[in-house]
Amino acid sequence: MAERKEATVDEPVRLTTLDMARFVADGYLRFDAVVPDELNRGVLEELSALLGRRSDDPGPFQPRSGTPLADCYPADSALRRVYELPVVAGAIRSLAGENPLFDHHAIHFNPAGSPRVQDLHCDAAIDSGDPTFDIQLFYFPRDVGEGEGGTRFVPGSHIRNIHENSVARYQHFAGEQFFSGPAGTILIFHQGMWHAGQANPSDKHRWMFKLRLNPTEPQVRLWDTSDYDEVTTGPWDHMFATTGEGRTVAAILRKMHPWSFDGEYRIETMERVRLWRYLSGDADFDVDWYRTRIEGRAGLLDGADA
């Protein structure tokens, strides 16, 4: 993560421009051990009490879809305190705005030794291809060690708009990751990230709490933009004219994921530019001149003989 401005107690710590560029390139951001142990223990108690309850049962921990996040969980609950942590609240506001709405949550509990596994999938089969997006927070209140069956996901897959389970048959993607990390870690996924729960071969129960949020305002420059001019170049920034090194948005958006290859990589880059244009409000932003070249030809055939 990039360095952020220091914040006063309880003030949301918003993402930087480079953080946002990494989100666009990778489809996720990771915050290791951001939730203190005391809160993790409190959340585990709350999740244990909720486990097995129907989602439509009445109760303070069962918000309806469309409820503002601020009204979802009791003020004295550990879950609410997690989403009010300055780094977590700042990331949510940077990606989904001041007042995002609750879409749904899910308690993913896999007991020790369980062989249960999910197919690779993308949450929701009805998402459109426009650049707006929901975010999904994957919160791990207990540590997950390497080889203990942590959530599988494919970085960079978020831009490939698919039907929910149309990638279920695919295994062993180059560059895929299996979550491992300390208790209190949160991953924030773009809604389109391909992922799957894994079997739990370890001798301890595994917990993950997922929360999906809908934005209620344009997701344009909601982050800390104090570094924006410093790290943003013009559409002339082409890979043949620069080394691609350095701390710039263009350099980050050029990232090639292991599952991609040259031809598709360029298409991926163009789609990242499309998303960045939405987030930045800069309709002229480009990487490697690809979209600028196409747009420059628009209208050349107007008036030409058929």
Image: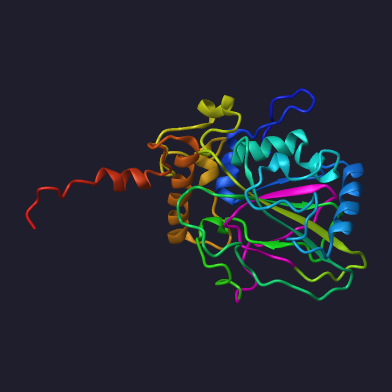
In the depicted structure, whether residue 4 falls above or below residue 37: above
Image quadrant where one finds the C terminus: bottom left
Q: Residue furthest left?
A: 305
Residue 288 picture location, percent across and down: 41, 44
Magenta segment includes 179: yes
| Residue at (46% x, 32% y) in the render | 233
Residue 60 picture location, percent across and down: 80, 49
| Residue at (51% x, 58% y) in the render | 127
Res 51 → quadrant:
bottom right
Q: Looking at the picture, tell me which residue is in the foreground, 205 or 231.
A: 205
Image quadrant where one finds the N terminus: top right
In the depicted structure, whether residue 286 falls above or below residue 104: above
**Magenta stretch secondary structure, dominant:** loop
Would residue 191 be seen by someone viewing this image from the given angle? Answer: yes
Part of the protein shown in magenta: 169-197
Res 95 → quadrant:
top right
Residue 288 appears left or right of 226: left
Magenta segment includes 177: yes
| Residue at (88% x, 43% y) in the render | 39
Q: Looking at the picture, tell me which residue is in the foreground, 143 or 217.
A: 217
Residue 242 appears left or right of 72: left
Res 240 → quadrant:
top left
| Residue at (73% x, 61% y) in the render | 56
Residue 22 picture location, percent across and down: 60, 44
